[in-house]
Amino acid sequence: MEDPLSSIFGTSTRELFRKRELFVTHGGLERFPAFMRTGPLESVDSLCRSYTGPLEVAQGTPESGIQIPVRDAHASALLRLGLTVYFTELRRALPFAGAWLKALEGELGVPECTSLAAFANASGSGLSWHHDRFDQLFFQLRGKKRFRYAPNTYVENPDVQFSPIAHAPPEFGRAYRHGFPPHSDDFLKDEQEPLVLEPGSAFFMPAGTWHTTAEQTEESLSMVAVVRAPSRLDLLLNLLDYYAGQAPEWRARAYDGWASADSARTEHAELLRLSAELGARLTKLDVTQAFGAWASHGHTTGTLGEYPRSAPYERFVRLPNSSALIEPSATPGKLRCVVLSGPTSRPQARIELAFNAEARPVLDWILGLERAFTRAEASERFPHFSPADLADLCGWLGHAGLIRPLPVPEWDDR
């Protein structure tokens, strides 16, 4: 599929995201993909009737425009109360959006990083001054929407969602330690840029851009594609968690760390020793493995639905309480393998796989293991299997939830 944004913005996806500037374009609604113009997004009424996911709402003034979640309320009733209604999870509700989102993620080089949401604004409603944590693509679908924005002159890449009228999140201090706006009216008038968005208008907004949609003049419907790509810090911290988490010394509890100076001295010294050792190890650790570790973590926790079968994982461990029924297939020379994944953070699943019959000894060996194993170990034990075939086999078993990758090098504690 071709670049999904080039026909709308007149530039490539990578160039659009690389510039880190708000970029707006206007045109006819027909230039948007069909899923943005039909079905649930054909009108505000269609969306309210078809949507069954979670909702958030906001009022309409600069002083009271923070989103809050609601329960047991219908979207149309909330709109009649004069609120902005935020439909937070549209990706599943828009199945025809899948190919477009896949193409967008492919251009960005990050798997399953996008989510779809929609704003339905009642007349007079909107959001107060704030900025978001993640980059966004905004598409105006119905009605006019008045939008004001301002550059963030306080901090670059804040990596936090923040509004002067809302609570300060835990990450606030690290980003805004050099200065911050204490009030919504602290934004200089000459820094504010107004936009009037009509059906067919679209813009890219980098994370950290101040903006407000308070006090809308008419009902409108907008779709937002939120791009939740990990930061480099996210990648590193996830990699360290998987890597150092293999060591019993790092998993040990830090009792006495907050005790008196004398009793805390031993615990402080141990943390210093471990930190120095970890620093030395990191100089030899291949940090490019952080990307595979992030993808594996996302599939394990359920934030990524698609298993990264193409990732070159080397070590795996069979999951307890997972099982496989292996029997001859109706197709000669084939095996039918039904995997029932055990209880994890992901829903239990029953997945049926097909393998060549010569894979049976490898499958039996993996099912009999009670420890982690490597593909190199499997290659040595089953030399007639090519490394590519073993990688493919492990990928499918990982996809089915029978085994799980250990996505970082082994911690050598000998």
Image (spheres, rainbow, N blue to C red):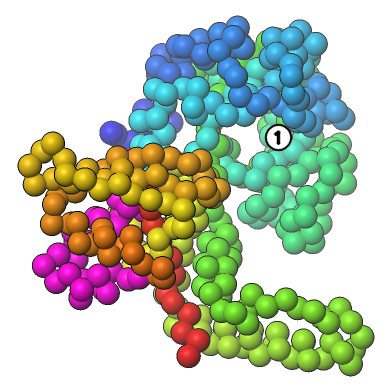
Q: Is residue 79 visible?
A: no
The answer to whether residue 385 is magenta is: yes
Q: Quadrant of the N terminus?
A: top left
Residue farthest to the left, as pictured: 332
Region rendered in magenta? 373-399
Mark 1, Cα crowd under 10 Å, few <14 / some 14-19 / many 20+, is many
Residue 259 image offset from top left, x and y in percent: 89, 82
407, above or below 182, in the image: below
Which of these two is toward me, 184 or 409? Answer: 409
Residue under label 1:
211
Residue 406 image offset from top left, x and y in percent: 43, 65
Q: How many marks?
A: 1
Q: Name the chief secondary structure element in magenta.
A: helix
Q: Residue at x 87, y 30 (%)?
A: 63
Q: Amino acid at mark 1?
A: His
The answer to whether residue 112 is magenta is: no
